[in-house]
Image (tube, grey):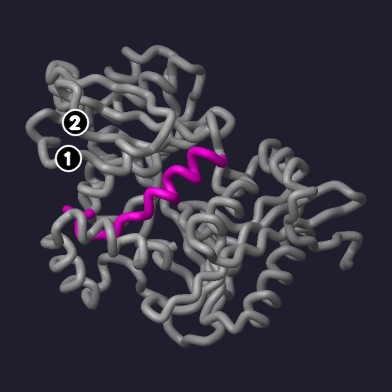
Amino acid sequence: MVGGIAIKRLDDSARGKWDSFVSACESATFFHRAGWKTVIEESFGHDCYFLYAERDDEICGVLPLVHLHSRLFGNALISNAFCVYGGAATSDVEAQAALYAEAEKLAASLGVDYLELRLRTPVHEDWARKDDLYVTFRKTMDPDPEKNLAAIPRKQRAMVRKGLKSGLAGELDEDTSRLHNVYAESVRNLGTPVFSRKYFQTLKDVFGEDCEVLTITHEGRPVAGVMSFYFRDEVVPYYGGGTSTDRKLAINDFMYWDLMRRACEAGYRVFDFGRSKRGTGAFNFKKHWGFEPEPLVHEYKLLGINDLPEINPNNPKYSLFISAWRKLPLPVANLVGPLISRSLG
């Protein structure tokens, strides 16, 4: 114990206290919730070290950490793996300092190559940093759906209206099977290994009503889907994709509009379009909706390596893999993909 602060590891007895703190802490996000420990351990088998700071028997900070160890992608301790945001969420600087000090000790004891923090704002001036690769897109919604539609730039609004006239319909699903089918096809076409069906269903099982699956159909056939997370007054569309008929019917445009409409009518006020890499199609798509990019900071405490890791599709060494993956038959991609994606946290 330092300065009256004790650092502990999350167990079942502290889950309620952890999530109550996360719900109230201004700097916390959906990706700080205790449920991620269950999701990641059960879906991928990775070791999770969810640390919390406690003072006078009250939690004053949390730091979710995941140990990813892969022959292909290295050995890292990440906050938070499989998530866009992470780092310590705390009520004061003393708790933050204590959590990061413990994280550095843990990283050294595990022998990782680096400790990675995924942040909205920088914390460590002396750590290696990437602040020009990823951005996030967040925007406040009006309670009136028509005002939100009018706020979309003209060309993109025309695509939304095209989708509205294409005979598309949005349906909420209690399971994730239809979503996974269209998502798997979408990411295969992008050259990306798909996550397992088990992962998607575990997310839904663990987070319940705060994890919503919206499936878009055309003439009764699923053509797109998106899994969204709800946290306080925010909706976060997270895993989404459409079939090859997307451009003809403006499926993605309709899907995200239908999600926005449903969310604002339900009382949510922030639409978090999530992380994208600069210069990608996803980045341009979100800008066309009138969202302004906000830089994200990835900080690295380098331990077993000297250079920043470059585990992202923009790295030229992955170009041949991406090109070959796009050509795989879908059943093969769906069989092999989860074995690779489990290490792409």
Q: Is residue 105 left or right of residue 148?
A: right
Q: Nearer the viewer, mark 2 or mark 1?
A: 1
Q: Nearer the viewer, residue 223 or 294?
A: 223
Query: Which quadrant of the view contains residue 245?
Result: top left
Is 198 in the magenta? yes
Which residue corresponds to mark 2?
251
Q: Give above or below for 24 relative to 332.
A: above
The majority secondary structure of the magenta stretch comes to helix
Label 2 vs label 1: CA separation?
A: 9 Å
Residue 55 horizontal/vertical position (percent)? 87, 53
Label 2 element class:
helix
Q: Is residue 144 left or right of residue 230?
A: left
Residue 326 horizontal/vertical position (percent)? 15, 60
Residues marked 2 and 1 touching at CB (< 8 Å): yes
Q: Nearer the viewer, residue 103 or 144?
A: 103
Query: Which quadrant of the view contains residue 24?
Result: top right
Label 1 element class:
loop
Residue at point 46%, 56% (across, down): 82
Residue at point 54%, 66% (across, down): 46
Residue 3 horizontal/vertical position (percent)? 89, 64
Badge 2 or badge 1: first in the primary sequence? 1
Give, as a three-letter code, the residue at label 2.
Ile
Residue 131 horizontal/vertical position (percent)? 42, 62
Q: Nearer the viewer, residue 255 or 267?
A: 255
Which residue corresponds to mark 1?
243
The residue stretch that appears in magenta:
188-206
Does the rendering let one see residue 73?
yes
Quarter occupied by the N terminus:
bottom right
Q: Nearer the viewer, residue 156 or 198?
A: 198
Quarter occupied by the C terminus:
bottom left
